[in-house]
Amino acid sequence: MAAQRERAVLAMSATENDDDEVDVSVVIPVHNCRAYLDLCLTAALIQRVKKELIVVDDGSTDGSGELLDLYASHHPSTVKVIHVDASGGAGRPRNVGLEHATGRYVFFCDADDHLGPEALERMVAMADRNDSDIVLGKVVGHGRRAPVSMFQQSADRVELGEGNVYNSLCCFKLFRRDLLERHLIRFGEGMRVGEDILFTVHAYCHAGVISVVADYDCYHLMARPDGTSIMQQAGSRDPLAWLAMIREPIRLMAAHIEPGPLRDHLLRRHFRLDVFTQLGAAFLDSDDVRRKDIAREVAALCDEWYTPGVHERLNSIDRQRATALDDIDRLVRLARIESATVRRRLTGVCWDGDQLVVTGSAGLHGIARDHGLAVVLRARHDPAAEMVIPAERKGGEFSVRVDVSALASGIWDLRVAVEIEGALRFGRLGADREDGVGRPTPRMIGGVVVLPYFTRDNGNLSIDVGGHVVAVPGGARVIRTRWGLGQRLLIDGEISVVDTAPAAVALRRIVWRERRDGRERAEPVTALPGGGFAAALAVGRLPPGTWDAYLELDLGGPAARFRIQADAGTVVGPRRWWWAALRRSVRPYTTRGRLSTVVRRLTARTVINRIIR
């Protein structure tokens, strides 16, 4: 085999016209992955986009090359196979594949992973709609950790300096090929690990529009059962090797991004996930000599790139590390604090007036003492919004009193915060709780409904202020109906929310919703003393259909709707009348104890035809 043997088994047609333009070139490096190729290639072949699969066999010896040639023979218009000598890493085969790509976009897929059936279709649609240079599709792990922070919600446009997209520096993304060619963006070659970090950092620095597809599992990251993947092998994250590798991506980023908030935001990622993480578990597993070497390399990176802006963006443990790089014993203690399990147990949660009292116990497993304890309430959709409540302590127990009236509308998650040596560790509170600790009843406080609850997935304690995700207990009931002038249905009723009468200002409107097509018509409602309400409903003006009645209230969050209840004996009979050669009928009735009305309109001819028949 020649030193640089590159053999295309079947090339794409050289006479393609614009109609045959390839949407996506899927580049797949292969080295001894025969057991995984069928799933990987089949998943790529079924993608509903115009595609080409460029598979680069990097000197496989397990029969992968022969299987690839078979796929190419069965899919001559789609699969191109290139054979090269083994390079020792994924960088060179990916670069070779990129040189042969013709698509508008390029997606890099490892041979032991696979795409979701609609992955490329969804990512290309996102890219075309927004003129995106990079699209991140949701990555899910199977036996391997997958990035999650950037996939909280889909986004047409994400600013590099504001979101978490830079946390993901793997190459399993959709890239605009023109971007890669204009800026000569390529993978590092001769690198065992980190070649994709260099590539993705460079691409991020030039990307005009970055988008995220978070509502579909686009890429499935698989662990090999035999542990033969490079990232599964021992030494793949050797601290000293990683610290040496990460210098080049940092320098590349800094060459493109001027000093300032954006650079500090990107450097935060590198210090948090690449640099200071080497002072964690791997640091504890090292001997004294190696610990000094690791600390020295970290200090060298800090001397060059650590700024006040980076410092203020880091968590408490990493800030402490930055000031203790010449104190190996303290670095060891910080690593133990970071690796210790946060033990916490909820022993009680109840109301005391308008305050929610939370009691429990907390600490760090294996560490006998701490310097402080607090409960932190953090807004789920605004992590910057939080309330910190220092705990009162007695023996091994703590208690806090939550003034829920000070919480803004939204979902608030409760965490316990344990502080030791200036470092903070957090743990969600509630999943581990004593028997008999139940969900406190909802309350109305200052016109806002407050609903403490335990989350469905993990059973942790949260507070829903305003009824965002928890159903608001309450009901609206009609006590009298009658017909008024103008074919209006006059109703009197009563409303109760959390076993109390809501304030008059809480009542917003009555909404009629057509059962079949979901159309809605809103009408005003008048609040009466003691939780009563009245309305004159212009049901005669409703279009034909079956309409269900709801009472809508403002309880401090999204509009709360209650289906209006009614007994058959309280509902007035139907009304019919002629208007502009149309016979109209409105029949209020109850269905399962709820108020509805049927509206019909008939022409004179239709009425006569019905009589004749």
Image (spheres, rainbow, N blue to C red):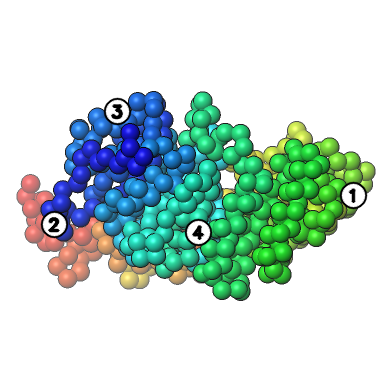
Name the amino acid, label 4: Val
Q: First in sequence: mark 1 or mark 2? A: 2
Name the amino acid, label 1: Arg
Q: First in sequence: mark 2 or mark 4? A: 2
Q: Which residue is mark 1?
A: 393
Q: Which residue is mark 3?
A: 66
Helix, strand, or loop for circle 4? helix
Looking at the picture, does residue 6 appear above or below residue 538?
above
Please name the residue shown 58% across and 60% down the image: 250
Q: First in sequence: mark 3 or mark 4? A: 3
CA–CA distance in space, label 1 to label 2: 75 Å
Disc 2 residue crowd, few under 14, some 14–19, many 20+, Cα 10 Å:
few
CA–CA distance in space, label 1 to label 3: 69 Å
Q: Which residue is mark 4?
A: 201
Would residue 81 be seen by someone viewing this image from the given angle? yes
- 445 and 280: which one is in front? 280
Helix, strand, or loop for circle 3? helix
- 48 and 274: which one is in front? 274
Looking at the picture, does residue 457 appear above or below residue 553?
above
Residue 464: x %, y % from top left: 63, 54
Q: First in sequence: mark 2 or mark 3? A: 2
Contact check, label 2 and label 3, Cβ < 8 Å: no
Label of residue 17 in the image: 2
